[in-house]
Amino acid sequence: MTTKPKAKKFRIRRSGSAAQSAAPTDARQPVAQSGVVDSAKQVTAEEAIAGIRREGLTGRQLRMARRVAQKHGLAATSDFDAVRLLRQNGIDPFKKANVLELVVPEDGDPQKAAAQAAAQPVDKPQKVQLPQTVQVQKQTLPSTQIASAEQRASEISRIQRDLAKRRRAKLVALWARLGFFVLLPTLLVGWYFYNIATPMYATKSEFVIQTAEGDVGSGLGGLFQGTGLATSQDSVTVQSYLQSREAMLRLDEELGFISHFQNEEIDALQRLDEDSTNEQAYNTFQKNVKIGYDPTEGIIKMEVIAADPAVSAAYSTALVGYAEEQVDNLTDRVRKAQLDVARKSLTQAELRRNEAQAKLLELQRNTETFDPASENAAISGQINQLETRLIDKRLELATLQANSRPNQARVTAVNAEIGRLQEIIEELRAQLTTTTNGESSLAEKSAEIALAQADLETRNIMLQQSMATFETAQLEATKQVRYLSLGVAPVAPDEPTYPRTFENTALAFLIFSGIYLMISLTASILREQVSS
């Protein structure tokens, strides 16, 4: 096997005369071409010039290189050839000293300029600044090479394959993240709800708190009476009590709430530990006893969850009983206080009326006459009659004495009768005002009895008012009575209510998807802010 000798690269230069002489006479016949073959030295020079072109030298640098080449007597065919010849002779065309030699003084003597350049201090090494090259990828000018259709199709196909590869890689990474952060947790949650979670039974009940119906009042009280606003405070109070620790402890004491949820048959996530605290038990109580109040209708809705339907119904019945007791105790103290005050006032009025009546009876018993007032009136009437007769006798005496010769016997008889009338009047008056044997006079006894009677009448009026107040207090206390009306009685379910496997799994998927979306958006925003 023989090896062929390596062929040297030659460039065929077409001769102008030969080209003209070889002009075809017929376009269909081949034409013979003649040319001159360039030497290897010329080819190397052209390759060096092509390399200098790619350096991206500026026009000022090329002109400077041409002047330096002329100074050193180098025959350059172009500016790029001048750079090549200078570098070939070991001269840097852009060196600062060479540039200074080009500066000619005013007298035009180049030797003096060279001497001045040589006189510059050379203590510090001068930094050689090569011309800046332009990177190929930063070319902004369009390429002179025109790619063929096959090359363009190949390049487009390569770009499309690259884009498809990147898209597939991103899609695979996206599905991997979704599977790890969304699908895998959702599958775990669904597996728990379908296979591990203990079935729970919920007992629902509804009740409303009402007041005793009374007469419709006026103003805002009449507007709110008979509506849910009249018992909203009581409903909220009962709701708060049923959700309190006191209700939980009472339910545990009576029906064993904590021990029921410590049963080993309940799964670990819903089961209470053996050494659980009251706070942990209260958290479980809040999760399994759900109470809501509807202010528009005034209805309290309660849902009690347990691992056994009978236990759930028993818990619900017990809580309804607690609510009824709480409702009974809401206004009991106020009603008792109102009734106690009214009853005490009535008792005092009765006692004082009895005292006034006893005093009147005692005065009447100590008086000799049955009715001092009547006796006093009778005596007063007698005194009035005697005074009238006394006046008549005095007039008669005056008439007798008016005669010139009065009848003395008649005058004496009239005087005697006037005197007797005066004595009788004084005796009667004495009976009214004079005390005898240390006892009060008839006028004093009459006044005391009158005062006692007036006091008795006043006490009777006060007693009547107290009785009316007591009756009003009883009516108001009756109006303030609250009672619980059970709308939906607690009934034990026959099928488990919880867990709702499909709904809970779908909810978990939505939650994990939302968390992933939020984290992804946050990360992309932070990445954009950092990159900008």
Image: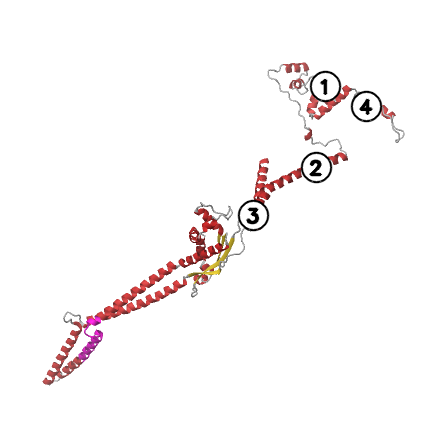
Who comes first in sequence, dot 1 or dot 2?
1
Identify residue for label 1: 85
Compute the Cα span from label 4 to label 3.
90 Å
User: On residue 161, which mark appears?
Assistant: 2
Compute the Cα span from label 2 to label 4.
44 Å
Is mark 4 in CB contact (under 8 Å) with mark 3? no
The kind of residue tagged 2 is Arg
Q: What residue span does the magenta drawing correspond to?
A: 363-388
Who comes first in sequence, dot 2 or dot 4?
4
| Left-right relation of 52 to 289 | right
Q: Nearer the viewer, mark 4 or mark 3?
A: 3
In this rendering, is residue 375 above or below 105? below
Q: Is residue 378 magenta?
A: yes
Q: Could you tell me which secondary element the residue under label 3 belongs to?
A: helix
Who comes first in sequence, dot 3 or dot 1?
1
| Left-right relation of 106 to 190 | right
Who comes first in sequence, dot 1 or dot 4?
4
User: On residue 195, which mark appears?
Assistant: 3
Compute the Cα span from label 1 to label 2.
48 Å
Who comes first in sequence, dot 4 or dot 3?
4
In this rendering, is residue 7 above or below 531? above
Q: Could you tell me which secondary element the residue under label 2 belongs to?
A: helix
